[in-house]
Structure formats: C-alpha cells, structure tokens
Image (cartoon, helix red, strand yellow):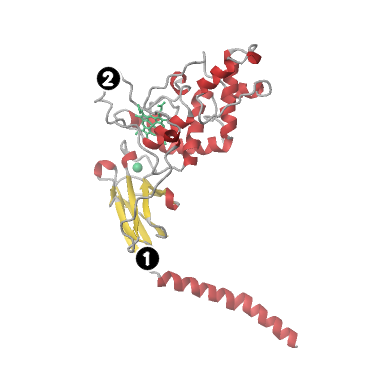
Amino acid sequence: MRREIFALGVVVLSFVVFPASLFAYQAWRTNALDARVIELTANVPANGGWQPDTIRVHLGERVRLRISSTDVVHGFAVPALGIQVDEILPGHVEEVEFVASRAGRFPFACTRWCSVDHWRMRGVIEVIDPQNPNPASPTFAPPLYQQLNVNIDAAHPARNVPSEHPSAVRGAVLAEQITVDADTRTQSPSDVFAKLRADAALKSYGDLQLWDAIAFEWKRAAGDDAIARGRQLYARDCAACHGESGKGDGPAGRNLPGRTVIDASARRGPADFTNAAQMLGASDVLLQGKILRGGMGTGMPEWRSLYTDQDMWDVISFIRGFVFEYGMSDKK
Ligand code: HEC
Ligand SMILES: [Cu+2]
C-alpha cells in the first residue's frame, strides 16, 4: 500500500506539479520583463527607407519590434543578432522580440529587392550600456587583404587566360593525374596556372587541361555546401546588380551613382563575373576585400557590416563558378 501511494506521488509530481510550475514560471517571466515596444516602418529608399533607421535601446532591455511596410514587400534582417523576417507585407505587422544582451552596434537591412535602391535600405540597432555609454570602439583584426598587403584598387588582369571557360567537371577526371597544390584563397588562378605550366612533369598536358584541373581544385577546396550557401546569398544580395548569369547586367545595376560621373570609357558598372581575363587575375582575398569594403565611388555596396567571413567565402566560391563552370545549375 505504501508503495502504491509513493508511486502515485511520483506520477502526480512529474505529470502535474512539475509542468504546471514550469508553465507558471514562463508566464511570470514574460510579464515580469515588459518589452519595450518600438514601431519600425519599411519604405523604399526613395521614400525614406527605414523609419527610424537608428534604434537605440539599453543593455538588458527586452525589445519588441513591430515592423510594418508602407509600400511594397520588404524583408528584415539583423545578422549579428540572428534575426530574420522574410516577408513584411504592406498592411501587416510583423513582430520580433529580443533581449539586448550585448552592447554594441548591430546593422540591419532589408532583404528583399524592393526597388532599384534597395541595397541602401540599411539601419542600425545601438545597444547602449548606461554604465558605460561611450565605450572605446571595439578593435577588429584588419581584414585579410590588409594583413597581406593586397591592393584591392589596382587593376587585376590575368597573366594567362584560357581559350574558353575551364570546366570543373572535366577537371574532376584529371584530378588523379594533375596535382594542383595551391592556396586557393591567397593565390589567383592565373598565378597557379603559371606555376603548373612551368612544371616539366606536366608538359604533356595542354593549357586547357591545366585550367580544368584548376577549376576543379577551386570547387573541391570550397566544397559543395559552401557553393550552395553562396548561391542563395548571391540570389538575395547580388544578382539584381551583377545579374543572374553573373554578366553584370542585373536590372538594378544600370543607373548606379558614379556611372555617369566617371569617364565613360571606364566600365564601372557591376563587375562581369564571367570575364575570365579579369576574374582569373584576382585572388579570393582580393575579391573578399572588394566585397567587404565596397567600391568607392561606384554602386558596389559594402558587406562587412552584414556578412560574416563565412558568408563572404561562400559567395566568392559561388561566383568562381561563372568562369569555372560550376554551381549555377546544380541543385542542392
Ligand atoms: C547596387 C549594385 C551592386 C550590388 C547589389 C552588388 N554589387 Fe558588386 N559591384 C557593383 C559595382 C558597380 C562594381 C564595380 C566596382 C568597381 O569598379 O570597383 C562591383 C564590383 C564587385 C566586385 C569586384 C570584382 C573585381 O573583379 O574587381 C566583386 C567581387 C563584387 N562586386 C561582388 C559582389 C557581391 C558578392 C555582391 C552581393 C553580396 C555584390 N557585389 C552586390 C555593384 C553591385
Ligand atoms: Cu529592400
């Protein structure tokens, strides 16, 4: 009898009392910490972009953003806080809640191509610690291109250009015979080609075969997952200017600021990623430098405030496929 009462006790405790107290605790927590409600409206940049575009909150505060659109469909992302709202439909209110648990500046951006100037649609959430309202600005390690002294503003024509686009698919077949020993981040493909071409052991291979092996090595070093992630980032953030096919002919790239001001002979529209003579002369580090800093005086936006290092490597891995013939059509 004693035993049965004990067992019943255990059952009541584990199925009733414990869950109930957990539930009560959750409810108490949500009510106890009242969220600070902030209204945020999304407008195409021509109509003012984010209102407000600077959101200041205190460290430790629970914040509830109520986001609405006054015109077309927008998106909202704060990458550093892991916040993403895919769709903000006109006439609806999307709510996101977060606790401002870290002081600092957290850039946010629209993630939908809402208009030609979409990429200007950015803002920042500032989390201020009242105890320390003016902290020294954090120091970051300088980006790789600076550490390696790569001049990202210099022209980077390839020293060697293949007669046609190399193919990573053909290169896969050669991988057993041709060892491409290269650092695919810091060396440009054309420098790697020069090294292979000078290798007497590879004399029997034609130029295009060496290029194919290089194309495959770039793909292998990046990995299929990185290329697949890069494809998504590219579609969301780059294709409108650089074009679906990478040719620099996206609809948003046509009337960029700077294009009309600069010497008409200088092609300063979005870069053409299918141009082997240009792309093969650039190392991944150089491309990363341009992506994170943006092209001064042209419409190339900076991505340092929104992209992680991994995001940048992923998108570069994908872009390489426009010359190396991979990534565009494979489905994940
Ligand atoms: C608003 C239009 C626009 C968007 C969006 C854009 N770019 Fe660009 N991009 C440009 C322009 C214009 C240039 C040419 C800059 C120059 O001449 O220095 C450029 C240049 C570049 C270059 C330099 C190429 C080279 O060989 O020097 C890279 C790499 C690049 N963009 C990558 C990207 C990536 C990756 C994205 C998306 C994350 C992106 N761009 C989004 C307009 C854009
Ligand atoms: Cu937008």
- Mark 1 or mark 2, which is nearer the start of the sequence? 1
In the image, which disc is placed on residue 264? Answer: 2
Q: How crowded is mark 1: few (under 14 residues within 10 Å), some or many (20 or more)?
A: some
Q: Name the residue under label 1.
A: 35
Above-or-below relation of 66 to 294: below
Residue 91 visible? The answer is: no
Above-or-below relation of 14 to 329: below
Looking at the image, which is closer to me, 201 or 1? Answer: 201
In the image, which disc is placed on residue 107? Answer: none
Which quadrant of the view contains residue 60? Answer: bottom left
Q: Label 2's element?
A: loop
What type is the residue that disc 1 sits on?
Answer: Ala
Ligand 2 under 8 Å from disc 1 Cβ: no
Image position, residue 101 (x, y; %): 42, 60
Image position, residue 268 (x, y; %): 33, 25
Q: How crowded is mark 2: few (under 14 residues within 10 Å), some or many (20 or more)?
A: few
